[in-house]
Image: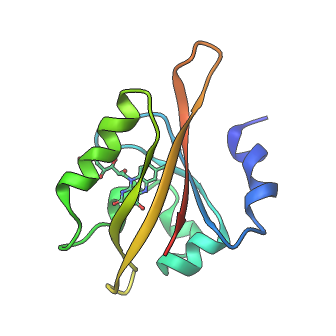
Amino acid sequence: MTIVELVRPFAETLDLAVLVTDGDLDRPGPTILYANSAFARMSGYPVAEILGQAPRRLQGPGTSRQAARAVTRQLRTGGRFHGVLENYRKAGEAYLCEIDVRPIRGPDGQPTAFIAFERR
Ligand SMILES: Cc1cc2nc3c(=O)[nH]c(=O)nc-3n(C[C@H](O)[C@H](O)[C@H](O)COP(=O)(O)O)c2cc1C
């Protein structure tokens, strides 16, 4: 069973936005593997359109580079990122987004994916 198959039935009915990416933090990654309907409502992106993109796609002119880099830094050092970033809806409207990202680890302890819980 894949991570997406495992997460989907739990996440689909949540009001909280959920994103799952692969474990590759190097640009152009990470790649979005799953987004729930709450994420589509919050961001304005249809799920089919956001799959295969990087979460960086949600950034805009007001997004703090320092805060965005902190996500990668904290995930690379094995931790969790919990903070607020300025995201942009598909139509361009900015929203402050509380983002909680955690690694999903494989048997060798390395992150194979990341899961984010997001709300505005
Ligand atoms: C699961 C997950 C969800 C993320 N969600 C967001 C998000 O909603 N908004 C955002 O600006 N960055 C988000 N990021 C962070 C970006 O993907 C990326 O780590 C950040 O832009 C820093 O990397 P960069 O310097 O290569 O752009 C998320 C990362 C992960 C792994």
Locate the N terminus by quadrant.
top right
Residue 87: where, in percent of width, then height? Answer: 35, 71
Q: Residue at x 75, y 55 (%)?
A: 8
Whether residue 89 is visible here, answered yes or no, is: yes
Task: Answer above or below: position of 24 versus 60.
Answer: above
Whether residue 25 is visible here, answered yes or no, is: no
Residue found at the very far front of the displayed protein: 83
Residue found at the very far top of the displayed protein: 108
Residue 19: where, in percent of width, then height? Answer: 56, 56
Q: Is residue 85 left or right of residue 23?
A: left
Task: Answer above or below: position of 77 versus 55.
Answer: above
Residue 106: where, in percent of width, then height? Answer: 62, 22
Residue 113: where, in percent of width, then height? Answer: 55, 36
Q: Could you say which quadrant of the image residue 95 lies in?
A: bottom left
For this rendering, which residue is in front, 91 or 108? 108
Q: Is residue 22 left or right of residue 3?
A: left
What is the basis of the colouring in this image? rainbow
Q: Residue at x 50, y 53 (%)?
A: 100
Q: Residue at x 37, y 75 (%)?
A: 96
